[in-house]
C-alpha cells in the first residue's frame, strides 16, 4: 500500500493535424503519478484526449469527447498558450 502518492495533471494542446483546408488540434490531459512506500517508488503517466479543436472555413470550434460542441473560451482558460496557438494557425503559421 502506498504511503505517499503524488499526482500532477496538466491539460495541453497536442500537435495540430492539417487535412486540406481543415486543421484539427487535439486537447489532451496528462496525468503523472508517483507512489512511494518505505522500500519502493512507482511512476506512471497517462495521456488521454479531452477535446478537439476544429478550424475550417466555418471558423473555429471545440468539441468534447461526447462529440458535443463546447465553449472554446473554456478551453482557452484551461490550456496555457492556446489563444496564441490558435492565432498562429489562423494566420497560417506553425504553432
Image (cartoon, rainbow, N blue to C red):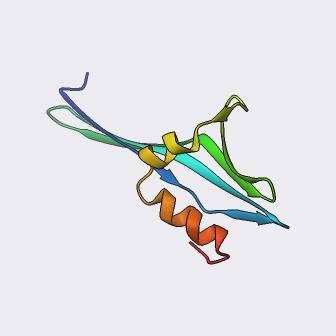
Where is residue 27? Give x, y as percent.
57, 48
Q: Residue furthest left?
A: 38
Where is residue 86? Give x, y as percent.
58, 62
Residue found 14% across the figure and 33% down from its top? 38
User: Which quadrant of the figure has residue 65?
Assistant: top right
Q: Nearer the viewer, residue 37 or 63?
A: 63
In the image, is 75 to the left or to the right of 24? Answer: left
User: Which quadrant of the figure has residue 92?
Assistant: bottom right
Q: Nearer the viewer, residue 30 or 23?
A: 23
Q: Residue furthest top?
A: 1
Where is residue 35? Give x, y as percent.
27, 35
Q: Residue furthest front?
A: 58
Q: Residue furthest bottom?
A: 93
The answer to whether 10 is drawn above or below residue 92 in the figure is above
Q: How many marks?
A: 0
The answer to whether 28 is drawn above or below residue 37 in the figure is below
The answer to whether 91 is drawn above or below residue 78 in the figure is below
Where is residue 4? Give x, y as percent.
19, 30
- What is the quadrant of the C terminus in the image? bottom right
Residue found 26% across the figure and 21% down from its top? 1
In the image, is 50 to the left or to the right of 79? Answer: right
Q: Nearer the viewer, residue 41 or 76?
A: 76
Residue found 49% across the figure and 57% down from its top? 82
In the image, is 22 to the left or to the right of 74? Answer: right
Residue found 45% across the figure and 50% down from its top? 79
Q: Nearer the viewer, residue 33 or 66?
A: 66
Amino acid at each position: 500500500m502506498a504511503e505517499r502518492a503524488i499526482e500532477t495533471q496538466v491539460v495541453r494542446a497536442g500537435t495540430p493535424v492539417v487535412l486540406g483546408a481543415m486543421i484539427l488540434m487535439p486537447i489532451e490531459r496528462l496525468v503523472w503519478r508517483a507512489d512511494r512506500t518505505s522500500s519502493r517508488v512507482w511512476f506512471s503517466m497517462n495521456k488521454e484526449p479531452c477535446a478537439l479543436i476544429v478550424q475550417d472555413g466555418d471558423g473555429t470550434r471545440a468539441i468534447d469527447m461526447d462529440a458535443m460542441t463546447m465553449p472554446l473560451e473554456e478551453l482557452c482558460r484551461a490550456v496555457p498558450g492556446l489563444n496564441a496557438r490558435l492565432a498562429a494557425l489562423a494566420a497560417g503559421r506553425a504553432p
